[in-house]
Image: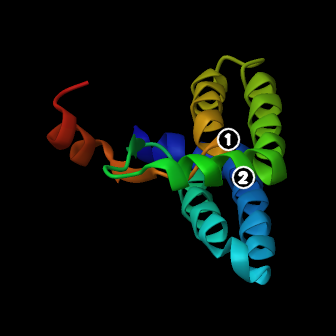
Amino acid sequence: MRFILNIIWLVLCGFWMAIGYALAGIICCILIITIPWGLASFRIANYALWPFGRTIIDKPGAGALSFLGNVIWFVVAGIWLAIGHAITGVLLCLTIIGIPLGVANFKLIPVSLAPLGKEIVTTRQADYRYGSR
């Protein structure tokens, strides 16, 4: 079922959202100081292509620098990517088949707003680390 949802996701919205993250990552990597945001953006682009079967967890040891970096990210790119997820999620929820995809878009909004200090893992790894959800 995850495979089918990922294929439908890729066709309907994953490809376009991943392009948005990749563009943000390229811009951040061109400006040398913002390379950490660029790398985080590329990680999320990968997740936006194939989200089902994976989840986002907090990185252990992420501290004040991650918070400060997330504030900067929010202002520069995070708000725009989150708006893209919100609009896409609402449009997908208009159809019955699109509801799970719309919910997945809404789940991507927090990481699009604050990507630093997060880690993308498989759901099995998350269950192993934090117990069954």
Q: Nearer the viewer, residue 88 or 113?
A: 113
In primary-sequence order, the first of circles 1 and 2 is 2
**Label drawn at residue 73:** 2
Position of 108 compared to 93: left or right?
left
Q: Amino acid at mark 1?
A: Leu
**Label drawn at residue 105:** none
Look at discs 1 and 2 and give the one toward the viewer. 2
Position of 1 compared to 14: left or right?
left
Give x and y (percent) for residue 120. Answer: 42, 52
Find out whether the residues at labels 1 and 2 contact each other: C-beta distance under 8 Å.
yes
> Gap in Å between the C-alphas at discs 1 and 2?
7 Å
**What residue do we see at 75% from left, 71% from top?**
28
Give x and y (percent) for residue 101. Answer: 61, 31
The quadrant in which the N terminus is found is: top left
**What residue do we see at 65% from left, 75% from top?**
35
Position of 76 compared to 114: left or right?
right
Q: Residues within 10 Å of mark 1 (few under 14, many from 20)?
A: many
Q: Secondary structure at mark 1?
A: helix
**What residue do we see at 30% from left, 42% from top?**
123
Residue on which the image places disc 1:
113
Q: Amino acid at mark 2?
A: Trp
In which quadrant of the rendered view does residue 29 lie? bottom right
Q: State whether residue 94 is above or below residue 22.
A: above
The quadrant in which the C terminus is found is: top left
Q: State whether residue 47 is above or below residue 40.
A: above
**What residue do we see at 78% from left, 34% from top?**
88
Q: Secondary structure at mark 2?
A: helix
Give x and y (percent) for residue 97. Answer: 64, 24
